[in-house]
Image (cartoon, rainbow, N blue to C red):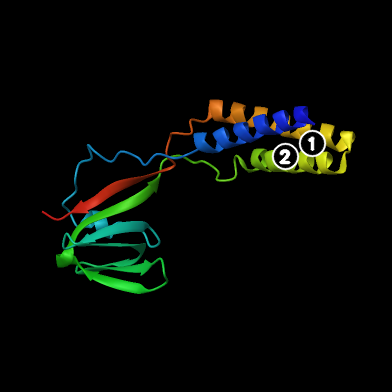
Amino acid sequence: MTRHRRILACVSIAVTSHACATHRVPPNATGQTLSRDWTSVRTLGSGAFVTITVDACCVSHGYVREVTDTAVTLRERDGGVRTIPRDRIERVEMTVRLKNADAMNGFPIGAGMVGGLAGTFVGVAVKNRQVQGWSLAVLGTSLIAGFAYLARHDPWEPDYATRVVYARP
């Protein structure tokens, strides 16, 4: 029984370290050139996610509904609609996708890990060596696939970045 506990401890450590390795670091937005032209805001498409700094005190996040020469209308995350006059807007930032990464890339690997771990626990609980063996095989294969995936895909590379669209002169 101690052998099984050692195996489960090693598996738990591997799964935990895998979860820590996929932590995302926020992108560095320094060194960007600031646009002081309102036409850059006018070119934002409907549905673009933006962060607007209002009078250097408040920040609004939302999806662009409409941009005019005098205001920006946002659909906020809570579903409300807010119109912000242009003369109160100090800065507009847009969240952009850096790479065309599928959000589900690691899902099958994670499902294999969870299923293999669950099957191993069930096999230990019911004392069934065949279930244990197959579950450990699935778990081991998923762990190897997970580490291979991480080796090919840098987990520290952010998927999104913030790009400054406008800064009031």
Residue in the image at 60% along x and 28% along y: 147
Type of amino acid under label 1 = Ser
Give coordinates of residue 73: x percent, y percent: 30, 69
Q: In the picture provided, is 108 more to the left or to the right than 91?
A: right
Q: Residue 117 carries which label?
A: 2
Please identify the residue farthest to the left as the structure is shown.
169
Residue nearest the observer in this picture, 66 or 50:
50
With 69 as the anchor, is 95 left or right in this view? right
Using the image as rendered, state which of residue 86 and residue 57 is in the foreground: 57
- Secondary structure of the residue carrying tag 2 is helix
Q: Position of residue 130 (x, y in %)?
A: 89, 34
Quarter of the image for residue 67 reads: bottom left
Q: Where is residue 32 in the image (x, y as percent from the top left)?
A: 23, 40
105 on left or right of 25: right
Residue 131 sits in quarter: top right
Estimate how packed mark 2 is, as few (under 14), some (14 to 19) or many (20 or more) residues with alpha carbons within 10 Å.
Answer: many
Tell me if residue 10 can be seen.
yes
Q: Are marks 2 and 1 in contact (CB under 8 Å)?
A: yes
Residue at position x 43%, y 34% from top? 157
Q: Which residue corresponds to mark 1? A: 135
- In the picture, which quadrant includes the N terminus? top right
**Which residue is pictured at 16% across the width and 66% down the height?**
88
Q: How crowded is mark 1: few (under 14 residues within 10 Å), some or many (20 or more)?
A: many
Residue type beneath disc 2: Leu
